[in-house]
Image (cartoon, rainbow, N blue to C red):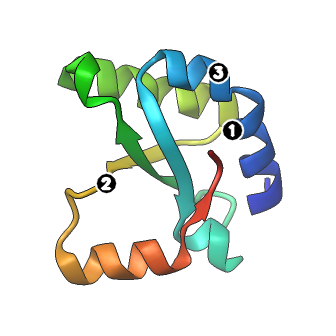
């Protein structure tokens, strides 16, 4: 699976993910840079609907659903939780799915 395929799959499931509380979702990391290996996970940056008050279990559930949809382990990172230097790099390379 390459970055185009991941982004396409995320867009196909946008409605479901929005209903789960995801406002924005972007791909970053090795998949975007074309450096992924067969055992690489998929790094996703998400913004969640603050009015939904999602619990940690809700977010883990979304991460597991994304792994199921994409057929690979997913590392789901919430916007604003990374250290500033890392956040800057992630935002520079991130490709928005929705």
Which is nearer the N-term, disc 3 or disc 2?
3
Query: How many marks on residues?
Result: 3
Q: Is residue 85 above or below residue 78?
A: below
**Which of 71 and 95 lies nearest the eye of the viewer?**
95
Residue toward you, 36 or 19: 19
Q: Dot 2, how many residues are within 10 Å of its Cα: few (below 14), some (14-19), or many (20+)?
A: some
**Helix or strand or loop: what does disc 3 sit on?**
helix
SS at badge 2: loop
Tag of residue 10: 1
The spot of residue 68 in percent (x, y) is 61, 26
Check if mark 1's residue and mark 2's residue have beta carbons within 8 Å.
no
Crowd band around label 3 with a 10 angstrom C-alpha radius: few (<14), some (14–19), many (20+): few
Q: Which residue is labeled 3 in the image?
A: 15
Marking on residue 52: none
Q: Nearer the viewer, mark 1 or mark 3?
A: 3
Q: What element carries label 1?
A: helix
* Mark closer to the chain start, 1 or 3: 1
In x, y percent, where is residue 84? 20, 77
| Location of residue 61 (image quadrant) | top left
Task: Report which residue position mark 2 lands on.
Answer: 79
Residue under the image location 48 percent in, 80 percent down: 92
Along the line of sight, which residue is nearer the eye, 34 or 12?
A: 12
Q: Are marks 1 and 3 in contact (CB under 8 Å)?
A: no
| Circles 3, 2 touching at the beta carbon (< 8 Å) | no
Q: How far apart are the alpha carbons under marks 3 and 2? A: 20 Å
Q: Residue at 52% across / 46% down in the picture?
A: 25
For marks 1 and 3, give the CA distance: 10 Å
Rendered view: 60 above or below 97: above
């Amino acid at each position: 699976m390459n970055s185009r395929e991941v982004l396409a799959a995320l867009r196909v499931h946008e409605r479901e993910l929005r209903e789960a509380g995801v406002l924005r979702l972007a791909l970053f990391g090795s998949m975007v840079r074309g450096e992924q290996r067969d055992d690489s996970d998929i790094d996703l940056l998400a913004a969640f609907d603050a009015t939904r008050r999602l619990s940690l279990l809700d977010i883990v559930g979304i991460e597991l659903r994304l792994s199921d949809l994409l057929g690979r382990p997913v590392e789901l990172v919430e916007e604003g939780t990374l250290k500033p230097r890392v956040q800057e790099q992630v935002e520079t390379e991130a490709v928005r799915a929705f």
